[in-house]
Amino acid sequence: MAFLSILVSALLLLLPSRGSSAVAAAAAFASGSAAIGEGGAGEEDFSEALLLKPLPDRKVLAHFHFETGAPETPSYGRHHRLFPKSIAQLVKKFHIQEMELSFTQGRWNYESWGGFEPIASSNAKPPGVELWAVFDVPPDDVDASWKNLTHSLSGLFCASINFLESSTAYAAPEWSFRPGPGSLRYGTLPREAVCTENLTPWLKLLPCRDKAGISSLMDRPSIYRGFYHSQRLRLRSVKTSSDGTHSSIILEQTLTVVLHPNIQKTSTVNYGENKLQPSWSMSSLFGRKIGGTCLLAKSSNVYLQLDWDLVRELKHLQNGNQELGVESIMEESFLSNPAFVLSDEPDKVINEVNSRSEGSSAILYEFSVRKHSDLGPFDLGFTWKTPIVWSCPQLPLRVSRFLMGSGNERGAIAISLRSTRVREGLTNAQAMGESCKLDVNVFQVVPWYIKVYFHTMKVFVDGKPIAVSDIIEKIHVSPSEDKVSPGVLEMILKLPCSVDSAGFTLEFDKGFLHIDEYPPDANQGFDIPPAVITFPNFHVKMHFGEDNSSKQSAVLSRFEDNIPVRSYTEVLLVPLTTPDFSMPYNVITITCTVFALYFGSLLNVLRRRVNEEERFLKSKDKRSSPLSRLRSKLSTKLGGKPVVTSQSSARSSSFISLKLILKIILVAGIAIAWQYFSE
Amino acid sequence: MEERQTTSSTATKPKTGTTKQKRARSGFWRWLVASVAFRLALVYLPRNLRLSTRPEVATPLTSIRRLAEGYWLKQSAMSPYAGSMYHGSPLLLLILGPLAVKRIEGQPEHLLCSLLLVIADIFNAMLIRAIGQSLQKAYAQHLEALDLFNLSEESRMLPSGDIAALVYLWNPFTIVACVGLSTSPIENLAILLALFGACKGLVPLAAFGWVLATHMSLYPAILIIPIILFLGYGPDAPPRKLLPQRSYRTCGSSPSSDQYCKTEDVTDLLELRILFSWRRVSQFLLWTFIWGIYFLFLCDISVKQYGGLSEMFKRTYGFILTVKDLSPNIGVLWYFFAEVFDFFRDFFLIVFHVNILFMMLPLAIRLKHRPGFLAFVYLAISSMFKSYPSIGDSALYLGVLALFVNELAGK
């Protein structure tokens, strides 16, 4: 029965049906029959969600979240109902315990889009491709597994992830990137271009692809028009049986985009000095509406999140209105308020239960797609009525990284941490007294052609240089080896909480590569992967009250995960000296000419003796043997020609041939010896 | 060819006063002090010249920054050879490492290292001077033995030792290498110790210098031939065939032939004296063996926990021979290997290194009676064709060249 249902759903999904309702109906049939067939626990499930959030800088964040779970299923064998088979095979073959792959375009703006929140911590990724994986294999086999994995993923996602195979491209951080045991490998490709060719295979992993449900919003032009685009795939496999043969896998796919709402719809009326935020709807953001639900999904929700700072501003506004005497209902959920209007009534309002010091907390409005799309295509609209200025939750320290120095020989990397002062209340509350310390965990991978001198590390706190040992609690360095491995720097900085700014610099020499090692367009420069800064003291975690709303939705349960705040620095572009690519032959011939000149002139000096040469020439006639003299006399008499020259040349040629043979034997001997020793 | 010119033209040398020489002696010390003062002035210069980062001065083998990095790695309980930073001797790291890192408040960076290198430079100059003096003495002795003493008074010869020492000290290359904190003055010190020991017949010292120099930079290994010739033939033997020639000529040209033909016997005796002394050579080889074992033992102790001797040889000699670092220097190998096709890399590595070795034997045959000059030629060739040449190497062979100032002057 299960086979039948898979067959039917697969067939129907392949049909080129424009209207999603047909697919939905078919899928409903398939899922229904599957449910009858399987029943009980241990079912594969799929849930989808879209989280929308207005950002302070007039943009909108859209966060798609799809989660597929494949519990331990001995009955299925190698087959799956919802879970993508290719991923399951990947996990089984390479014994992946955990893996994360992200394709990102654009840079996450930590200042205006927030840093201290779950989405920023787990979905703000460095540009290009980032891949890390934890393997459940013996330590010796980890590298082989990694190499195979990169090749498989490269084929699966149409990206050059296979460049991460080279040992110069990946690192094995011990504790700074991710705490906990396991054989972790980490690699980034900052230069990788991300486009629809990477999105399409990613969508293929979804049971409904982009034909139905929330994923049908993904209109390629509007997604890639955004300011930030990050497509992520995360795998977690949990061993359930003791012998390790069966494991349940959770596949989490997220797409985070920051979009700018279409301007023409917003009213141009200015309220004072503040401009009104642009109003938006799903159709104006994506150019599409949610037509129907993906019936294979267990839950399919759209959320609208209001930041706690925005909530606080709204409360202020409401209180102000009340003081002015305007009739308004004081409501926690702001369903009717003077600031904005929602086009649809939310099914549920979820308040974050948080202990933030300001006393306000974030609000989430939940819209069930299934309920709303009954009447027609679902299109959530958000219209501002009053201009409001708010800010996003900031990181404890704002991190930036830059290059110092000039020229093509050397330089220095500097990482600067500046306090945002926003978290001050929190940090003070967290640890009273002067012993308060702020931990900063730095993980930096440096390619081998950036030869870092770790002994030149200088640390500055509040502009004053201080001893390295005073501030670095723990440091682990694995220096780069030419053409073999990148340099890895892991360290924990312990900064006083009152710190205003801190920074450290590392000097480096730029390496010189072989002509074949330069990538195409070498003059553009080389990228240094971003440093990963983690704040282990701070965790992003949202609590959603006692009602079990978060249990139903995967995205909310992800928000409740206790993960440390993490941020990435900028990618640095280092110009390296490039050789003359066009003329290796000239270089080879010039160098060889120099060597030949040296050799020839030295040989000449050694062989020639000014006085003795004349003597030699004089004695030459005397020295020639009586036989040859006789012969020459004879020949001159017979032929009347001087044969002496020809005779001497013949002699010399025979001599040369003997020399030549000796030389050949010598060279052959050297070659054999080389062969022997090189083996 | 200089020796031929010298021997043939000593008769026409003009006479000069001896007081002049005395003045030159005192002048030498003055110039030596001045050169040290000049170096110290450069070290204390308020504006950092940043000479230690110049590619001409600091090759991957001689750079003090790499040495400091190796020391840092060692202090952090890692192998100093981890990564591709340090490629020098572990013993040098023990001596120079603490000095390179130590910083005295209010004093320029790497002050102790600079002082050590200045001292090494002074030692080098003194060794060159001693070598020059002993060479000159041996030369004079030979002329005396050839009965040309009246023509070869010391006063007529330039004090080649003093001149060479001053040329070494005031060579801008030497000064830059010293102030630029390259370790080449120390490598030069080992080479000069070996040559000095060989010149004076101090077999253990010669063996020590040779083993140390080879340990530090591999290329001085070829100096074993001049050292053996030094020890075997003495500092400066005239070409053997010139002796009978010369005596024959004097014998034949003189009017009273019966009196002068006795000298022929004397020169025969002399010829016997300059026969190759195998005893000292075997002593040298024995001492080389002892010092070699000793150095290997010391290195083994210091690198035992970091992969042992094989790792050390791979990271030092292997790095030198395979030319892995393609950063620019004053040689040609980096330029060549940055562009050559990978397929031919091994072939050209062999060709370029064989170029140094190839001329060794012919030169040794040709110049076996002048081991000092042979050593100079070897030094010049190896410092031109070594994989990471620096101006410190050039400074050495230019200094040694000045030892032959009399011959170069055409006297």
Image (cartoon, rainbow, N blue to C red):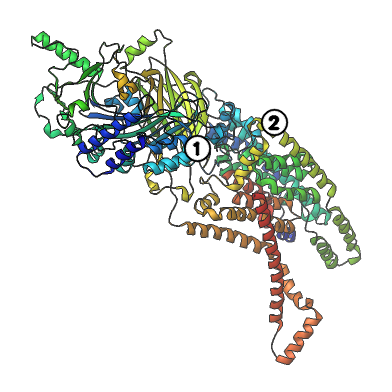
The disc placed on residue A145 is 1
Residue A244 in the image, given as x and y percentages of width and height? 50, 28
**From the viewer's perspective, is residue A609 above or below residue B202?**
below
Decide which of A659, A227 is in the foreground and name it: A227
Q: Residue at x 62, y 39 (%)?
A: B185
Q: Is mark 1 in CB contact (under 8 Å) with mark 2?
A: no
| Distance between the alpha carbons at the discs numbered 1 and 2 | 38 Å
**From the viewer's perspective, is residue B15 above or below residue A301?**
below
Residue at image mark 2: B301
Q: Residue at x 19, y 36 (%)?
A: A288
Mark 2 is on which residue type?
A: Ile
Mark 1 is on which residue type?
A: Ser
Q: Secondary structure at mark 1?
A: helix
Q: Residue at x 71, y 82 (%)?
A: A644
Decide which of B410, A46 is in the foreground and name it: A46
Q: Quadrant of the N terminus of chain A?
A: top left
Left/right of residue A26 with respect to residue A133 in the rendered view: left
Q: Residue at x 38, y 14 (%)?
A: A498
**From the viewer's perspective, is residue A576 above or below residue B144?**
above
Please tell me in which quadrant of the rendered image residue A360 appears.
Answer: top left
Q: Secondary structure at mark 2?
A: helix
Left/right of residue A522 with respect to residue B308 in the rendered view: left
Badge 2: chain ID = B
Q: Nearer the viewer, mark 1 or mark 2?
A: 1
Decide which of B387, A252 is in the foreground and name it: A252
Residue A331 in the image, given as x and y percentages of width and height? 17, 12
Label 2: few (<14), some or many (≥20) within 10 Å?
A: few
Please tell me in which quadrant of the rendered image residue A70 appears.
Answer: top left
